[in-house]
Amino acid sequence: QVHLVQSGAEVNKPGASVRVSCKASGNIFSSFGLHWVRQAPGQRLEWLGWINAGNGNTRYSQKFQGRVTLTRDTSATTAYMELSSLRSEDTAVYYCARVLEGSGALDYWGQGTLVTVTS
Amino acid sequence: AIQLTQSPSTLSASVGDRVTITCRASQGISSALAWYQQTPGKAPRLLIYDASSLESGVPSRFSGSGSGTDFTLTIRSLQPEDFATYYCQQFNTYPLLTFGGGTKVEIK
C-alpha cells in the first residue's frame, strides 16, 4: 500500500512562489514516477509535470514551463512542487499522484493541497 | 497536443440505470487511456487503466472499452455511491498527460 501525504493549505500574494510537498510511504520511493496535477474551482484536472523519483528527471507542461519546478529528496521520500510568479488563476487544489507501473495511469493520489492566491 | 473531449458533460440517471460516458481523442492514442471517479472535496480515484483493465478493488459494474480515438466508460447498474464526476486521461504521450473535461453524473 502506498500513501502520499501532502503539505497543508497555503495563502500567497500575487507574484510570490509556493512550494507544496508530497511525502511517500509504504513502497520504494526511488521506483516512483510522480505527477503533479491541479484543479481550479469547478474546473477540469490539469497536468503540471512529472518527476522520476529515482534519477530526478523531469518533464513539464508547456503551459507552466519556466514557472514550475519539481524536485525530490530521496532520503526523506518526499517530492516537491514549486510554482513561481503566482497569479489569481493559480488558485487551485494541487495533487501529487503516483504512476501505475507499466501504465501511465495514476493509481495513488495525495489528499490535495489548496493554494489560494489573493492580495 | 492531444485533446480529449468527453460527452455528455452532465448526465441525469437513476439508481439501477446503465450509464455510458464517451471520451474522444483528437488523434489516435492506441489503448493509452484511463478513467477516474471524483467526488466533491476528494482526490480522483482510478477506475480503469489501459482502456479496459479494471483497477484492483473497483466494482465489476464498471467497464471500459475502445481504442484509437473513441473510448467508453460503462456503469452497468448505477449505485448511489456512483453519483460523481468522471474524467478520462490519455498517456500516449507519456510522461505528458491530458485530461478530459469531465462528466457529472447526477441523480434524476
Image (cartoon, grey):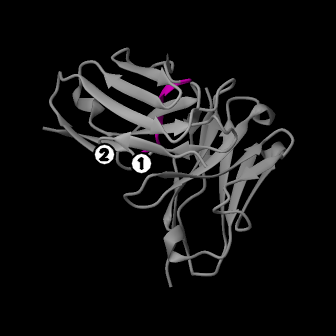
**Residue extent of the magenta highlight:** B42-50
Q: Residue at x 68, y 45 (%)?
A: A23
* Residue B43 within the magenta-colored segment of the rendering: yes
Q: Percent x, y for residue A17?
A: 67, 73
User: Residue B9 — which label?
Assistant: 2
Residue B77: % across, % down: 24, 19
Q: Are marks 1 and 2 in contact (CB under 8 Å)?
A: yes
The x, y position of residue A112, in whole percent, is: 52, 51
Does residue A105 sit above or below A45 in this rendering? above
Mark 1 vs mark 2: which is more N-terminal? 2
Q: Amino acid at mark 1?
A: Gly
Residue B96 on the magenta segment: no
Looking at this view, name the residue that lies furthest to the top: B60
Q: CA distance from mark 1 to mark 2?
A: 8 Å
Q: Residue at x 83, y 46 (%)?
A: A57
Residue under pointer 1: B101
Residue at 29% x, 31% y is B82
Please tell me whether residue B28 is drawn above or below residue A90 in the rendered image: above
Q: Quadrant of residue B9?
A: top left
Screen quadrant of the C terminus of chain B: top left
Residue at 51% x, 42% y: name it: B26
Which residue extends farthest bottom? A119
Chain where mark 2 sits = B
Which residue extends farthest right?
A: A55
Q: Amino acid at mark 2?
A: Ser
Name the chain letter of the residue that bears numbered label 1: B
**Residue A30 placement: quadrant:** top right
Residue that sits furthest to the front in the current view: B27
